[in-house]
Amino acid sequence: MHAGFVVLSRTKKIQTFTAKIHLYSFNNYSYRMDMSKREKFKSRNSLVCLLQGLTGKTTTVELRNESSMTGCIEIVDGFMNITMKDVHFTDPYGNKNFFEQFFVNGKNIRYVQIPERMNILQVMSMELPKVKVVQN
Amino acid sequence: MAAPMEGETSESETEQCEETDVFSPQFDALRALYDSNLQLPCPEAEPFRDILSFLNHYNSITDLGQVGTSNVKKPPTINPDENAKTSEQEQPKDATGRPNVRPSKSFTAKSGKQSGMLTSVSHAGPSGLQNQKTPGRRTQTVFNLMEDADGPLSLLKWCFEKKCKARVCTRTFKGLRSICIGYVVAFDKFYNLALSDVTEVYRKPPLGQTIYHQEVLTFSKILKQFSMPKKGNTETPKVKKSRNRKERKVRLEERLKSEGIFIENYHPPPEDRDTAHQETKTVQTISDIGDTNVEEGQVGQEKKEESLKTGESREESQREIKTDAPKKTGKDLIKPEEFHRRYVRQLFVRGDNIVLISVKKR
């Protein structure tokens, strides 16, 4: 996909910008401009790519403070921060809550249970091409 | 800026020309932006939004093997004479009203827009772009890192290749938490692991201040739990011990003598956390057998009897143990009931929480 967004009206600028992002996500060899270099590096060179392949799946994430959350993973970024939706959250004391949206800092994660049917290596190899680092 | 007025001298005209001339050292970008008379060196060139999109375009061209690769390495030459053009060129403008700014690049005196574009690239940073195009350059990915694992990570690589079970020890914020035994499916340099067929034996840390008074958990202690029978099944039946004080005392003395504990002129060591811990441990295990007031047997038995009678504080009497006595193998403080066990088919463990990894069989 070549960049050809020359003529943009001031009002339409924002719309077309978001459209651009969607196009990037469908393209295999895309230059992700919303990720910093560090984030891209982590996405490619660590197992975060495995977690990124889990988007849309319902799994259990266990945190460092002995709490756990079961829900559908929306987004995982390069730093392993996870946004989940429709989450049943159990706190360390055992109390259960339900949240529609939940964000977890990557550093607080201890375990992520991967659904049984998924082939880990395959998922990783599918995720890797989505983030291409521009060499400078 | 408006067109030069008629009354202006030739000097100012040339001045203006110089300022709007892309190649001149006096090039004034701001002025050029607003100059309607600006003469572009290459008006047919395709405008781009930013450098990234330009690079994208450039790569696609060189991929196709078109004209240009030979031109890339040539140094840019400045030919200001080429710019003299008669026709008035109006700068293509954005719909925003501002003229579309082109990245300032130098051009060789070659015809054709493509070659012009490509030669300009050499000015923009040849080394970086060449890196992109050298054949045989492997992009770094997780899989590459897994293959090239060197040093300590080579153990993980070994596990991964030979498909043997690894024992992964995890931690709480203070102390050990669990051991997971499973096959390593993937790993990375941060020690994040993807494991499969995982059996985990863990002990949840108690909430609050209790954790500081808890018995320190070690690797071997957790490992023992794996081989222990499941909850509810006890292999060794409990032996009922008599509650008679004297009998207990005698039993205790005998046992201690057999282990070689002699307490004579015992000086308690300086307040040291570890030793204090050990002391309390040994004392408590002994006291587990019987009543809390039972003391350890020693050579100076009479003295002990006296202390018993006088009802000295438990602590004082407890201190009279030699710490270099062999460790008591009675009931451990850590009860098997505290541990939980679970099986997970596929688990991802974040490297932060891993303490050590050992292999089950070599």
Image (spheres, rainbow, N blue to C red):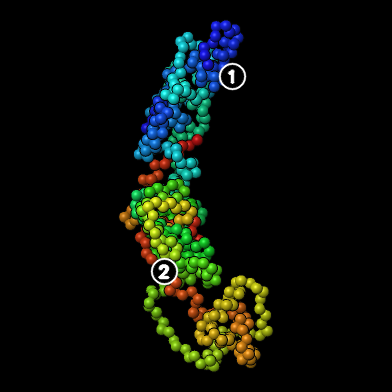
Residue B165, x across and y down, in percent = 41, 62
Q: What residue is drawn where x is 39% and y is 59%?
A: A97
Lateral position of residue B4 relative to residue B265, left or right? left
**Mark 2 highlights which residue?**
B340
**Mark 1 highlights which residue?**
B25
Q: What residue is drawn where x is 44% and y is 53%?
A: A104
Vertical arrangement, residue B149 with respect to residue B123, above or below: below
Classify the position of the N terminus of chain A by image quarter. Answer: top left
**Do the residues bearing badges 1 and 2 touch, measured as CB atoms within 8 Å?**
no
Chain of the residue displaying label 1: B
Lateral position of residue A23 relative to residue B275, left or right? left
- Whether residue B304 is visible here, answered yes or no, is no
- The amino acid at mark 2 is His
Towards the viewer: A129 or B89 = B89
Residue B175, x across and y down, in percent = 52, 65
Towards the viewer: B6 or B121 = B6
Q: What residue is drawn where x is 50% and y is 65%?
A: B176
Q: What residue is drawn where x is 53% and y is 16%?
A: B1
- The amino acid at mark 1 is Pro
- Whether residue B340 is visible here, answered yes or no, is yes
Assess disc 1: are there few (<14), some (14-19) or many (≥20) residues with their C-alpha within 10 Å of its C-alpha: few
Q: Residue furthest left?
A: A117
Towards the viewer: A102 or B221 = A102
Asked if labels 1 and 2 share a chain, the reply is: yes
- Corner quadrant of residue A68: bottom left
Lateral position of residue B296 relative to residue B134, left or right? right
The earlier-in-sequence mark between 1 and 2 is 1
How far, Cα to Cα, is label 1 from label 2?
A: 76 Å
Which structural element holds mark 2?
strand
